[in-house]
Image (cartoon, rainbow, N blue to C red):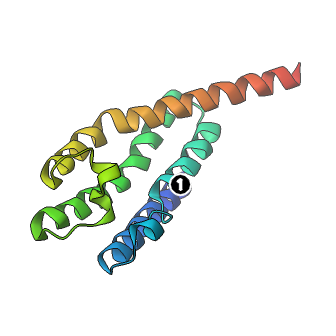
Amino acid sequence: MSKPAIALFIAAILLVGAIRFALSVSGVPDATVKYVSMSAVIIVGMVYFALTCKTWKERMKAAYLLILPYMLVEGAALGYTVATGNRTIFHAAEYSFGMTPFWHFIGHLVGGVTWEPLGVFVVMQVIGFVASRALSFRQN
């Protein structure tokens, strides 16, 4: 796994998350803010690392490193909502599953070290498997 590449993706996720938070707290409608997407950056990173990582261990590490900055931004934004009572897009109804901001925050803490990076890893493994099979089929 390329250290400069993962550093670039981490920085991009943090930057997009900061812009998303700033837009949300400044009153820009959620319908607009939703297009400033950390998920989009993560998806690009998933595909990139699925194709460039040589081993499952590298993919697992990349999956965690892609989710970590996302969780940092989510946690900070939800912490802001818990502390101030001011709603942001991070606790919009379509993302919070009816939870209070506090339980949404706890859910991200748990999910951020369990199923979220594992889900990213599984998708990366599938992409890597399909790409390797397509390449070997093409060479034969």
27 and 39: which is toward the camera = 27
Residue 19 x/y as whole percent: 41, 73
Q: Left or right of 111: which side holds 53?
A: right
Residue 128 x/y as whole percent: 63, 30
| Dot 1 crowding, Cα within 10 Å, few <14, some 14–19, many 20+ | few
Residue placed under numbered mark 1 in the picture: 40
User: Residue 140's quadrant in the figure?
Assistant: top right
Residue 45 x/y as whole percent: 55, 49
Q: State whether residue 73 is above or below residue 61.
A: below
* Residue under the image location 58 percent in, 50 percent down: 44
* Residue under the image location 50 percent in, 35 percent down: 59
Q: Left or right of 45: which side holds 79?
A: left
Q: Left or right of 82: which side holds 51?
A: right
Mark 1 belongs to which amino acid? Ala
* Residue under the image location 18 percent in, 65 percent down: 81
> What is the quadrant of the N terminus in the image?
top right
28 and 19: which is toward the camera = 28
